[in-house]
């Protein structure tokens, strides 16, 4: 099937918009590549320090004929998704030796668990941790001793931070190596029901804890389709994973074999050989379009709207919110994975998963096939799925039919004709809404505003029975300049209870929601934020707000709002405690959500 003309048009406008930044970026990468393997520029003293602890690999490193692979790891055992990475370096080193290469741990990067910090002060560091991860990766790779890199990361800010760094070192080949999802536990809809019951005071904390522990119960990513699993989809759709690597469970022989295969592939695509494939050639405009199409077709995390913009800029590609909106309009929603449905990612994978989706989208002309990937030229390679034969990965044809039409449907007969995201523009600024899990009758909400400056204040008002009505809950001073743009996921149960009571309810915020944004309509990432001159900072209780996902509008209908003085809350408490002192410079210099909310790009 030839490429859909609408996909071509959107891609062409991104290419044209990016020309002033993409061309200089590629020129820099080409110059760095022409300088040759990094180790050639180190003195004998430099190299002696780099190889001092490498024991049996020293001879190969000194000879500089074998590729040396740098491992950047986000291992910690606070994150269930990252706990399996503990044993990866030794497996990678052994696989590298068998492939005639060497490997070293170049460095570690921080990796915070948003599940631990949800609703806590630490969440105010979460978004900025992406930029810290990019900076830390830069330090790791600055030793200039590597011919390729393997990036070990899975969760919310970790993969975007690693991609930003991989693009910055774009002359190096690089593969992303996942760990896979935990096996299925308590169904997500049952967990959500208990959370709502707790919010309404119907069950105690003992029942809540029991449900949470039954849901998050072992190594691997959380099984709902939030930001972590959206990241894994993205790495596959953008050609940075080995095909079929995303959703193989940890601790299985196939998982280990895929890690070894990634190592072997990294060794084979360096500038020392004949298949040189630097990251800068993979992360082009077409790859980012493919990634956005994947996000829409799967109903993925709203966080990726911010992250993809930042990742693209690191590669000289300028993506805007309108691109997401326009690609969403022409991309069919093919998957129903919680919170968009009852299934988890293991059920999705078993039903046909990413290989089925990629094949369907290619056949429909909704993805670029002519791209470079870590596996070779062409996205058709990602139709194939891995299997284990004699201890090694081999590939077979991927599924051509869905094995469960309640979870996964063909592009020709999707769950809905358009993807899961809408851009919202109006006198309140620019925002986005994830509509894939919101019932159509709730796509337009018009109601009086209730103004808050924290999610705790919202929860207290709920407990005081002050929100038992039609209401647009406005939570402002939650943007990157105010307090680091935390996720407001703790509001989901409260707002869902109000909605279930029959009220018209919506959320408007300059903060983020979550990769698990659910059934309540939420206009998020509103920019300009309140602290940056946004009209959201001038709203009062009772102002009439209209959130319209059908027309793509977000407006205050009350007259005279723009003439009011902006609210001036005391935000001094945001500047200290739990490490927030260290991030003051980040808050001062952060960009708007519409430009990726970044510090380093």
Image: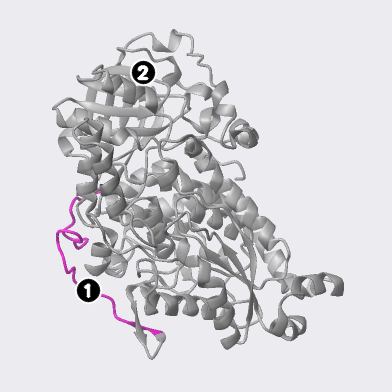
| Residue ID at (30%, 18%) | 449
Work out whether 93 lies above or below 576: below
Specify which label sits upstream in the sequence, 1 or 2.
1
| Residue ID at (42%, 86%) | 392
Q: Main secondary structure of the magenta part?
A: loop
Q: Which residue is mark 1?
A: 400
Cα distance between the residues tagged 1 and 2:
50 Å
What segment is highlighted magenta in the picture? Answer: 393-418
Find numbered disc 1 in the image and state the secondary structure of the residue it sits on.
Answer: loop
Image quarter (top left, top right, bottom left or bottom right) of the C terminus:
top right
Find numbered disc 2 in the image and state the secondary structure of the residue it sits on.
Answer: strand
Q: Which residue is mark 2?
A: 451
Who is closer to the viewer here, 1 or 477? 477
Q: x, y (%) of residue 57? A: 69, 83
Q: Number of labelled discs?
A: 2
Residue 257: quadrant of the picture:
bottom left
Residue 196: quadrant of the picture:
top left
Who is closer to the viewer here, 325 or 265? 265
Work out whether 268 lies above or below 2: below
User: In the visual, does 460 lie left or right of 318?
Assistant: left
Work out whether 434 lies above or below 404: above
């Amino acid at each position: 099937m030839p490429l859909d003309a609408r996909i071509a048009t959107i891609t062409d406008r991104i290419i044209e918009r990016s020309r002033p930044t993409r061309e200089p970026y590629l020129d820099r990468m080409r110059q760095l590549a022409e300088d040759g393997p990094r180790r050639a520029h180190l003195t004998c003293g430099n190299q002696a320090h780099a190889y001092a602890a490498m024991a049996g690999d020293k001879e190969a490193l000194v000879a500089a004929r074998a590729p040396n692979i740098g491992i950047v790891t986000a291992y910690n055992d606070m994150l269930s998704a990252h706990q399996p990475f503990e044993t990866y370096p030794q497996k990678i080193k052994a696989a590298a030796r068998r492939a005639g290469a060497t490997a070293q741990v170049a460095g570690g990067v921080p990796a915070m668990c948003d599940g631990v910090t949800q609703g806590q002060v630490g969440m105010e560091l979460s978004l900025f941790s992406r930029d810290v991860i990019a900076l830390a990766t830069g330090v790791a790779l600055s030793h200039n001793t590597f011919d390729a890199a393997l990036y070990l990361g899975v969760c919310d800010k970790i993969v975007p931070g690693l991609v930003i760094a991989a693009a910055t070192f774009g002359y190096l080949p690089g593969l992303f190596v996942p760990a896979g999802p935990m096996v299925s536990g308590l169904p997500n809809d049952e967990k959500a029901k208990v959370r709502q019951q707790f919010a309404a005071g119907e069950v105690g904390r003992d029942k809540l804890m029991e449900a949470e522990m039954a849901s998050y119960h072992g190594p691997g990513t959380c099984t709902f389709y939030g930001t972590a699993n959206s990241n894994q989809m993205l790495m596959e759709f953008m050609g940075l994973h080995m095909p079929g690597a995303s959703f193989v469970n940890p601790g299985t022989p196939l998982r280990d074999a895929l890690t070894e295969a990634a190592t072997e592939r990294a060794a084979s695509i360096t500038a020392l050989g004949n298949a040189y494939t630097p990251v800068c050639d993979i992360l082009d405009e077409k790859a980012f379009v493919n990634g956005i199409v994947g996000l829409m077709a799967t109903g993925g995390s709203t966080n990726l709207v911010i992250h993809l913009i930042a990742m693209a800029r690191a590669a000289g590609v300028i993506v805007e919110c309108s691109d997401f909106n326009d690609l969403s309009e022409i991309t069919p929603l093919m998957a129903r994975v919680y919170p968009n449905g009852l299934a988890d990612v293991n059920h999705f994978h078993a039903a046909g998963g990413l290989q089925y989706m990629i094949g369907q989208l290619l056949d429909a002309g909704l993805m670029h096939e002519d791209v470079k990937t870590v596996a070779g030229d062409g996205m058709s390679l990602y139709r194939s799925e891995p299997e284990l034969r004699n201890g090694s990965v081999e590939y077979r044809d991927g599924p051509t039919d869905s094995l469960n039409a309640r979870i996964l449907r063909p592009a020709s007969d999707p769950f809905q004709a358009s993807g899961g995201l809408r851009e919202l523009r109006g006198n309140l600024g620019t925002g986005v809404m994830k509509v894939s899990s919101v019932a159509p009758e709730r796509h337009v909400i018009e109601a009086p505003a209730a103004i808050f400056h924290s999610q705790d204040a919202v929860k207290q008002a709920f407990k005081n029975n002050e929100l038992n009505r039609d209401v647009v809950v406005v939570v402002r001073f939650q943007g990157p300049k105010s307090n680091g743009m935390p996720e407001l996921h703790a509001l989901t149960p409260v707002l869902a209870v109000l909605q279930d009571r029959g009220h018209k309810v919506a959320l408007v915020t300059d903060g983020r929601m979550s990769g698990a944004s659910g059934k309540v309509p939420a206009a998020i990432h509103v920019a300009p934020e309140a602290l940056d001159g946004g009209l959201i900072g001038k709203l009062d209780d009772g102002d009439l707000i209209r959130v319209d996902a059908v027309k793509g509008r977000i407006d205050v209908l009350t007259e005279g709002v723009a003439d009011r003085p902006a609210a001036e809350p005391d935000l001094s408490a945001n500047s200290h405690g739990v490490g927030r002192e260290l991030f003051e410079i980040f808050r001062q210099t952060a960009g708007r959500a519409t430009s990726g909310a970044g510090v380093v790009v």
